[in-house]
Image: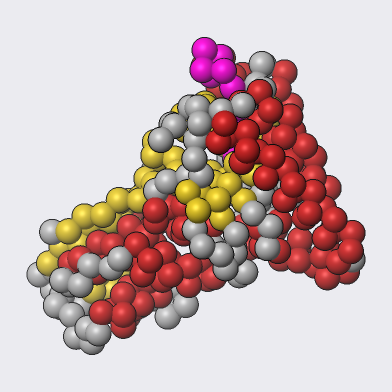
């Protein structure tokens, strides 16, 4: 038996603009995770048991473009194994689907790690991230690569598409409350819609992306020196630009406003938008109060996480 885990993730700043070459900041969320276990199977074939998505089948029953099939076949191809021994892959995740917490990438990362170890050819972090990125294309169309990166390396990162991975240095711990709207919002759709906007008026939306990039750089400096009061207004500014990009929603705006009215230092949507999660920067002593306010305002769940200094 081989088991691997992968955390969730949250984007702090820079979503959507990161697809167009601007930087983004993201951190792992270890309170939720994907778990994949590979066991020998008493029957021929490669069997997949994923009760969270009501899936129980043999690999050949899935289309090649199914993310799980693509991940499994990708590992077997990369390891040069054409006729593996029979085995069963058990998949479980506590990460809500289509909510901005990286559920798809976490399952891919845990699956790649568990399966490559089970066949005796463990993959390096670089190999895991590269293959998970290919699977992300099936989930999101034109992903930035930030999800597979922060989840694979399980550390805060500064991400720029095509650039060397940089670790985000955290000068002082800070606490976030993550509020889930409960609205499923596939990132692929919002990414596509933003691309259409950009193609119709590249100058206008390029300016928006540039402004988001400036916010990211200011947030990075604040995080690195521990100047946390600066972060709240930057979150608010980033959210306003995401509203302009049409990727917010009434549910997200309501939770963002609720968090701010309950004492949060700042708040914004996180991830693809149109649903999913928002995040609020809070003083540690006020985290429970803000979380309760979000639940009372209709959030389906509220998660408190602290980004630790390294």
Q: Is residue 43 visible?
A: yes
Query: Residue at point 47% right, 49% down?
Result: 167
Quadrant of image for the C terminus: top left
Q: Nearer the viewer, residue 246 or 44?
A: 246
Query: Residue at point 43% right, 31% down?
Result: 308
Q: Residue furthest left?
A: 42
Q: In the image, residue 156 lies at what x, y percent?
A: 48, 44
Q: In the image, residue 208 lies at what x, y percent?
A: 82, 53
Whether residue 27 sits left or right of residue 203 in the image: it is left
Q: Nearer the viewer, residue 88 or 83?
A: 83
Q: Is residue 282 magenta?
A: yes
Q: Quadrant of residue 262?
A: top right
Quadrant of image for the N terminus: bottom left
Identify whether 175 is placed above or below 263.
below
Q: In the image, residue 276 lies at what x, y percent?
A: 60, 44
The number of numbered badges drawn on the structure is: 0
Q: Quadrant of residue 40?
A: bottom left
Query: Residue at point 18% right, 67% down?
Result: 118
Q: In the image, residue 61 lies at what x, y percent?
A: 35, 78
Q: Quadrant of residue 200?
A: bottom right
Whether residue 70 sits left or right of residue 89 in the image: it is right
Whether residue 236 sits left or right of residue 308 in the image: it is right
Identify whether 236 is placed above or below 8.
above
Start-end of magenta stretch = 277-287
Q: Is residue 306 magenta?
A: no
Q: Residue furthest bottom?
A: 82
Q: Nearer the viewer, residue 289 or 210?
A: 210
């Amino acid at each position: 038996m081989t088991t691997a885990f992968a955390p969730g993730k949250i984007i702090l700043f820079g979503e959507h603009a990161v697809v167009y070459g601007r930087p983004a900041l993201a951190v792992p969320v270890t309170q939720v995770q994907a778990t994949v276990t590979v066991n020998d199977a008493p029957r021929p074939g490669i069997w997949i048991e994923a009760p969270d998505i009501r899936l129980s089948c043999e690999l050949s029953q899935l289309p090649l473009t199914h993310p799980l099939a693509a991940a499994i076949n990708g590992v077997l191809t990369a390891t040069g194994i054409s006729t593996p021994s029979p085995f069963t892959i058990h998949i479980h995740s506590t990460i809500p689907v289509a909510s901005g917490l990286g559920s798809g990438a976490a399952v891919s990362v845990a699956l790649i790690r568990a399966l490559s170890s089970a066949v005796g050819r463990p993959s390096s972090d670089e190999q895991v991230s590269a293959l998970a990125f290919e699977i992300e294309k099936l989930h999101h169309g034109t992903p930035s690569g930030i999800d597979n990166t922060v989840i694979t390396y399980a550390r805060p990162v500064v991400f720029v598409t095509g650039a060397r991975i940089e670790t985000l240095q955290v000068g002082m711990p800070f606490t976030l409350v993550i509020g889930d709207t409960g609205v499923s919002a596939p990132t692929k759709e919002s990414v596509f819609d933003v691309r259409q906007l950009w193609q119709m008026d590249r100058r206008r939306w390029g300016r928006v992306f540039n402004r988001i990039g400036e916010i990211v750089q200011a947030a990075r400096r604040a995080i690195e020196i521990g100047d946390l009061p600066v972060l709240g207004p930057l979150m608010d500014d980033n959210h306003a630009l995401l509203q302009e990009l049409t990727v917010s929603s009434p549910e997200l705006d309501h939770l963002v406003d609720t968090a701010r009215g309950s004492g949060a230092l700042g708040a914004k949507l996180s991830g693809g938008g149109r649903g999913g999660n928002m995040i609020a920067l809070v003083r540690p002593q006020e985290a429970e109060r803000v979380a309760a306010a979000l639940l009372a305002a209709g959030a389906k769940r509220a998660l408190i996480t602290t980004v630790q200094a390294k």
